[in-house]
Image (cartoon, rainbow, N blue to C red):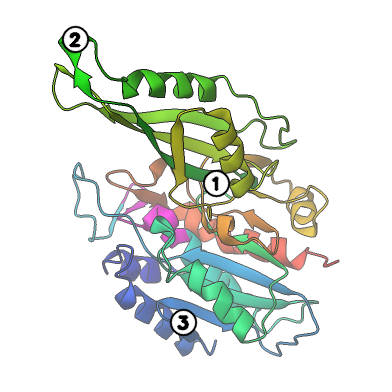
Amino acid sequence: MLALLKSLISTPSVSRDESATAAIIFDWLAVRGAAPQRNGNNVWALSEAYDPSRPTLLLNSHHDTVKPAASYTLDPFTPLEKDGRLYGLGSNDAGASAVALMQTFIDLRSTPLPFNLLLAITCEEEVGGENGMRAFLPHMRERGIDIDCAIVGEPTGMQAAIAERGLVVLDCVTRGVTGHAARGEGVNAIYKAMADIDRLRNFRFPKESAILGPIGVNITQINAGWQHNAIPDECRWVVDIRTTDAYSNEETVELMRSAVFDSQLTPRSTRVRASVISESHPLVIAAKSLGLSTFISPTTSDMSLMYDFPSLKIGPGDSSRSHRADEYILIDELLAAPPLYRRLIQSLTPY
């Protein structure tokens, strides 16, 4: 596993340019008899004796990375072992999870289980791209492979994330009428925008998620005007909404639109949905039986695209190390992950 992770670190795989790491993953699985297949830069494999009449558990993580931060003091593409750590871009997010799930799949692919295993190490997770999970899930449906639930490998300290918020970004435009500032002419778009911003600040959603709590709404950008003596006839502003399972993203957008009077609100996307798995789901029961704690993840992942089946996020590492300079994984974290994954899977009782 350590050698594989070092190979992935040393091979650049920034989102939308992951073909080289996809080849490494494919070859590693092929040498071990896993009969991998590729869907673009998504690499996947099924357990032996796949039976479509049985439930299917997806084991998923991603092999793309963000661009290295400018403040790196180490070479992001040169794996370095030091003081029990392995440094390198993607070591923590999410190379360690991907490698650990690959090893787990190899360990269990021939083991009799009451369900199928589907391993998928996918691309473009960091950008929510159209060629990653958004392409992989339709590809599975086209092949008649139904997924019943998923373990998603992300850095969680090998604790069980049972929920994560969704995300909607609104681009907002408020229009007025230009005029000379000295003459007091026109209609100031900034003032109209301020009124609508205040309405959103004070808006309260009628429903609240039992697990995720209230929806979070924050105005994060604003821009208007072109010179000091002209009344601005347009104000553009941005709203960051952290959605929950109380409403669909589309419903959330409509409620925001109903709260303003003078502004046009346009979502950039509604596909990053909140994800919540029931406390009574076998995956959660199995995790708790192993003494794992459950928590709400502060970060988003490809779970947001798994609309049709429940998912549990768990993996080695710590999300606070992600997307930062001199990223690292503790080697002990990496080595401890597959045994825990195996225990979790083998203690899982399907519905």
Q: Earlier in the sequence, mark 2 or mark 3?
A: 3
SS of the residue under disc 2: helix
C-alpha span from label 1 to label 3: 30 Å
> Could you tell me the amino acid type at mark 1?
Gly
In the picture, the quarter occupied by the C terminus is: bottom right
Q: Are the residues at dot 2 and dot 3 in contact (C-beta closer than 8 Å)?
A: no
Q: How far across and how far down the image is residue 164, in percent? A: 60, 45
Residue 297 in view (yes/no): no
Q: CA distance from mark 1 to mark 2?
A: 62 Å
Q: Which residues are magenta?
A: 82-96
Q: Secondary structure at mark 1?
A: loop
Q: Nearer the viewer, residue 238 or 111?
A: 238
Q: Which residue is mark 3?
A: 39
Position of 50 relative to 5 (above/below): below
Distance between mark 2 and mark 3 Cα atoms: 63 Å
Residue 92 among magenta residues: yes
Q: Does 180 sit left or right of 197 as displayed?
A: left
The crowd level at tag 1 (other Cα within 10 Å; few <14, some 14-19, many 20+) is: some
Q: Is residue 97 visible?
A: yes
Quarter of the image that includes the N terminus: bottom left
In this view of the protein, which residue sits in the foreground, 210 or 194? Answer: 194
The residue type indicated by label 3 comes to Asn
Mark with earlier residue (1, 2): 1
Q: Amino acid at mark 2?
A: Arg
Label 2: few (<14), some (14–19) or many (≥20) C-alpha neighbours in 10 Å: few
Residue 124: x %, y % from top left = 40, 64
Which residue is disc 2 drawn over? 183
Q: Which residue is mark 1?
A: 157
| Residue name at image x 66 percent, y 29 percent | 205
